[in-house]
Amino acid sequence: MVVGGGGREHAIIKKIKENKEVSEIFALPGNGGIASDATCVNIGAKDIEKIVEFAVENKIDYAVVAPDDPLVLGCVDALNEKGIPCFGPEGKAAIIEGSKVFSKNLMKKYGIPTAAYEVFNDMEKALEYLETAPIPTVIKADGLALGKGVIIAMTRDEAKAAVVSMMQDKMFGTSGDNVVIEEFLTGPEVSVLAFTDGKTVAPMVSSMDHKRAGDNDTGLNTGGMGTIAPNPCYTPEVASVCMEKIFLPTIDAMNKEGRTFKGCLYFGLMITPDGPKVIEYNCRFGDPETQVVLPLLESDLLTIMMATTNGTLSETEVKFSDKSACCVIMASEGYPVKYEKGYEINIPEEISGNVYVAGAELKDGKLLTNGGRVLGVTAVEENLKSAIDASYKLVDKISFGNAFYRHDIGAKALAVMED
């Protein structure tokens, strides 16, 4: 059983299907595109009670809880209580993403490199602090906000407006009751997903996300408009510093806090002039990073997942191809603000293996758009340039009304490689 219904879940399901012992996969709730690879069940990802009920009734052997909300709400705990083994952290460990205040304080306490910061639960005090704080600055809502609760303020006025919108106008609901105001770091960003059983850390291939809606990093922040892997800024030297100063210390810190983390821990890193620092943690596979990382995985995903549950990751093979991957997100015009749904999606059968469906529904046998990010289109090739070209060739073969996508996914990475 896979809980969730986006492109990330589609990528996970396609990979799990490669295991010959898997006879049936249920997706809760899944989506119109996932329906071609799994049995979709109309139970929302946050409906813990119904998820548990379904798992018990259908004698589920193994569950993968993919999105942040159910993890933070304790979905894994509830399933474990019924004897159903899961991939994903318990609620007390998922707080590493569920609360920015918790994760920043954890890093400070255990000396894990991150941006300097202050925490506020009083708007007036936050505004007062901003009178003299260094600008630019970063304002973060404490709780979950669909990956959008972060505002980079280039001026003092923008910073104050961000605080008011989070704390007074409740732009992100109760997530903005507490805010973190932190130092603006510079340097290339790197996403590293890592499997962990609470003892061993097995990093996956690094990736680079493209958050802004428009070409050349213009427009609003989104959940991600495309990714490439591996990230050329993540050199072997940087990787060994990250393992020693960030990855293992984080797992160790969580153990010391009585919050052992098992599952996939996502490290959002910035390679600053002072070395790598943590921008954020996620308690799960990132989206769309999953859509370039898993296609490069050569070992069996389900075997690795079960090893994180059983504490046997150190004796389990986690092997990635040395090829490159590029994923271009095809979205609905107007995303991430307002967009129309219900357009028919045409994907040629022969390339469906390269497509991860995020926002679509099946109606009368037709696949229709039903979200902001609609598809992730991924190609794997010998090198990054070929993967980018191949990915855009696939995009050209797909059509739906009001489709839009960035034309420069991977351009920044290629520029780094040419330097």
Image (cartoon, rainbow, N blue to C red):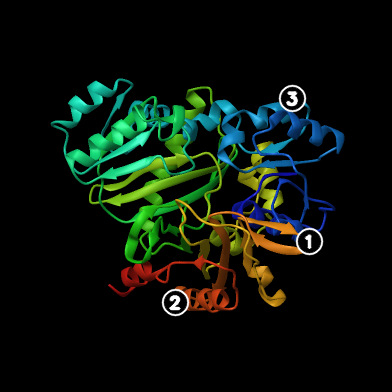
Q: Identity of the amino acid at label 2?
A: Lys
Q: Which of marks 3 and 1 is nearer the N terminus?
A: 3
- Can the viewer see residue 290? yes
Element type at mark 1: loop
The front one of 308 and 51 is 51
Neighbourhood count class around disc 2 (C-alpha, 10 Å): few under 14, some 14–19, many 20 upward:
some
- The residue at 43%/67% (across/down) is 406
Neighbourhood count class around disc 1 (C-alpha, 10 Å): few under 14, some 14–19, many 20 upward:
few
- Can the viewer see residue 381? no
The front one of 233 and 149 is 149
Real-space Cα separation, disc 3 to disc 1, in angstroms? 39 Å
Real-space Cα separation, disc 1 to disc 2, in angstroms? 39 Å
Rendered image: mark on residue 385: 2
- The residue at 86%/38% (across/down) is 58
Rendered image: mark on residue 364: 1
The residue under label 3 is 81
* Left or right of 157 on screen, residue 242: right
User: Given contact means CB atoms under 8 Å apart, are the residues at marks 2 and 3 in contact?
Assistant: no
Q: Identity of the amino acid at label 3?
A: Glu
Looking at the picture, how far across and down is residue 79, in whole percent?
73, 30
User: Given contact means CB atoms under 8 Å apart, are the residues at marks 1 and 2 in contact?
Assistant: no
Q: Which of marks 1 and 2 is nearer the N terminus?
A: 1
Element type at mark 3: helix
Please state, as top left, top right, bottom left or bottom right, where the N terminus lies in the image: top right
The front one of 393 and 235 is 393
Real-space Cα separation, disc 2 to disc 3, in angstroms? 48 Å
Q: Which of marks 2 and 3 is nearer the N terminus?
A: 3
